[in-house]
């Protein structure tokens, strides 16, 4: 039996804080689309809510990365979680008083998205300070596993059930999770401000430009960022209309919709635990290419076969492929990017990789309005299969090994 790797008390605190806040997010993951659907049945209107929550990755990702490299990352994460606690608390109060509207959901989603650009850049940048390089894939696998279990496996059924009891209940649960996570992050010991050359102060604009230039010059990471951007565009085009597809095509109840989301989580948990083993056996690049192909095939199923069990199985397969990709690419970035640039390069990577999500959400809504709720899944699946071929020809095991050697030698 393989010996379990110990990653230390600071990692455990970070892991626990992430698990708690993701549980709250999982509760709202099911409840928010149900709330939006209770207000409007239009795919494009519901897509606007999704787009508002993801738009900050296009507008503020680079700023979030610069903040992560200029501040103590632990303290930044705690401040952001406190802000999210307040935002969800105010939304819960609004719902209790009977204020329900699509513009309100868009404003709150946009605010949380802005906070997320800072938090996620800081949390990814802090991890290499908590574990060694050879522990990164294990640590990321555990973080991703906890996130998926809480966010997509445990949280959604609870969120759907709470939504049936009281519209505001899942919102208050999410707020409480952020408050607890903020307190827990503050217990992580140490200072986590990146070392900088203070003799030549630079502006935030110059910092952002430096991180963006570094990424654009790095062939492997630049290619992976573009691939992620296309995947997220296609994924959002399909998944934005999932709540309407589940309710109006599959005719699922609220609880069944919550359970449907957990099937994706089941596959994702397995993927988070298997990613490093798969990479060791066939190589990182081969594993990444197969992950894209698997995710692509999974998106085709809802478009071809409107059967609940088949759709649930496809979501599980897609979750597996998605988490294999996430664990391997996040770990690769953390091992290749210098610490003093980690926040900024990560933010540039996410600008390219996540900035496409609002466009994908709107595209999915428009396709569904024009051609039906199954059409976005067909569009996404076929396009992603083409992407899988492109990734496999551009990123190879040899090119990744070469990039690792250059990083060890301090070559950009």
Image (cartoon, grey):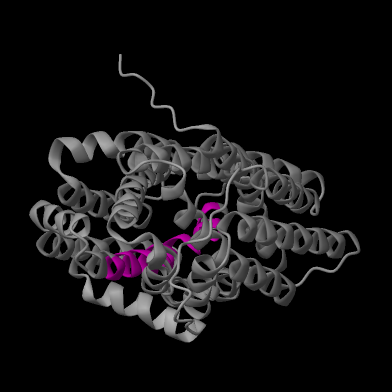
- Residue at 57%, 52% (x, y): give it: 191
On the image, the x and y values in percent for residue 290 come to 20, 49
Question: Is 148 situated above or below 43?
Answer: above
Residue at 31% x, 61% y: name it.
337
- Name the one closer to the observer, 35 or 252: 35
Q: Which residues are magenta?
A: 225-246
The answer to whether 69 appears left or right of 279 in the picture is right
Q: Position of residue 298 (x, y in %)?
A: 32, 50
Does the magenta-highlighted stretch encompass residue 291?
Answer: no
Vertical comparison of 50 with 209: above or below: above
Q: Residue at x 13, y 65 (%)?
A: 394
Image position, residue 116 (x, y; %) = 58, 63
Up the image or down, 319 lies above or below 100; here it is above
Q: Main secondary structure of the magenta part?
A: helix
Residue 46 occupies quadrant: bottom right
Asked whether, in this view, residue 93 is left or right of residue 129, the answer is: right
User: Could you tell me which quadrant the C terminus lies in?
Assistant: bottom left
On the picture, is 324 further left or further right than 16? left
Does residue 242 belong to the magenta stretch? yes
Residue 101 locus on image (x, y percent): 76, 72
In the rendered image, which quarter is residue 145 located in? top left
Q: Is residue 307 visible?
A: yes
- Taking the view exactly as shown, the residue that stands out farthest to the top is 1
Q: Nearer the viewer, residue 122 or 229?
A: 122
Residue at image location 59% in from the left, 38% down from the top: 13
């Amino acid at each position: 039996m393989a010996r379990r790797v110990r990653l230390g008390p600071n990692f455990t605190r970070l892991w626990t804080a992430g698990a708690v806040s993701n549980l709250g997010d999982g509760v709202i993951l099911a409840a928010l689309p149900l709330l939006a659907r209770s207000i409007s049945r239009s795919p494009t209107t519901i897509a606007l809510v999704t787009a508002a929550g993801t738009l900050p990755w296009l507008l503020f990702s680079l700023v979030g990365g610069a903040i992560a490299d200029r501040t103590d990352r632990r303290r930044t994460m705690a401040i952001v979680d406190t802000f999210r606690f307040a935002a969800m608390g105010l939304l819960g109060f609004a719902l209790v008083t009977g204020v329900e509207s699509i513009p309100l959901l868009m404003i709150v989603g946009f605010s949380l998205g802005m906070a997320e650009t800072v938090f996620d850049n800081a949390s990814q940048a802090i991890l290499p300070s908590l574990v060694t390089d050879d522990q990164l894939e294990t640590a990321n696998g555990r973080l991703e596993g906890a996130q998926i279990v809480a966010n997509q496996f445990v949280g959604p059924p609870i969120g759907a059930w709470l939504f049936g009891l009281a519209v505001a209940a899942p919102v208050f649960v999410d707020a409480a999770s952020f408050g607890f996570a903020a307190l827990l992050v503050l217990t992580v010991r140490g200072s986590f401000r990146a070392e900088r050359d203070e003799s030549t102060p630079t502006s935030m604009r110059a910092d952002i430009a430096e991180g963006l230039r570094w990424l654009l010059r790095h062939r492997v990471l630049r290619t992976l960022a573009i691939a992620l951007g296309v995947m997220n565009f296609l994924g959002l085009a399909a998944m934005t209309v999932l709540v309407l597809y589940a309710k109006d095509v599959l005719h699922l109840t609220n609880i069944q919709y919550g359970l449907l989301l957990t099937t994706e989580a089941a596959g994702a948990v397995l993927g988070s635990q298997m990613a490093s083993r798969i990479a060791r056996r066939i190589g990182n690049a081969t594993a990444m290419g197969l992950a894209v192909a698997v995710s692509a095939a999974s998106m085709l199923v809802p478009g071809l076969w409107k059967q609940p069990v088949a759709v649930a199985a496809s979501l599980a397969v897609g979750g597996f492929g998605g988490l294999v990709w996430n664990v391997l690419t996040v770990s690769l970035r953390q091992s290749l990017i210098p610490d003093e640039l980690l926040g900024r390069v990560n933010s540039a990577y996410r600008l390219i990789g996540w900035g496409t999500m609002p466009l994908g959400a709107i595209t999915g809504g428009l396709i569904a309005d024009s051609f039906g709720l199954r059409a976005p899944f067909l569009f996404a699946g076929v396009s992603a299969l083409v992407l899988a071929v492109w990734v496999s020809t551009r990123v190879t095991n040899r090119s990744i090994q070469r990039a690792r050697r250059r990083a060890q030698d301090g070559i950009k």
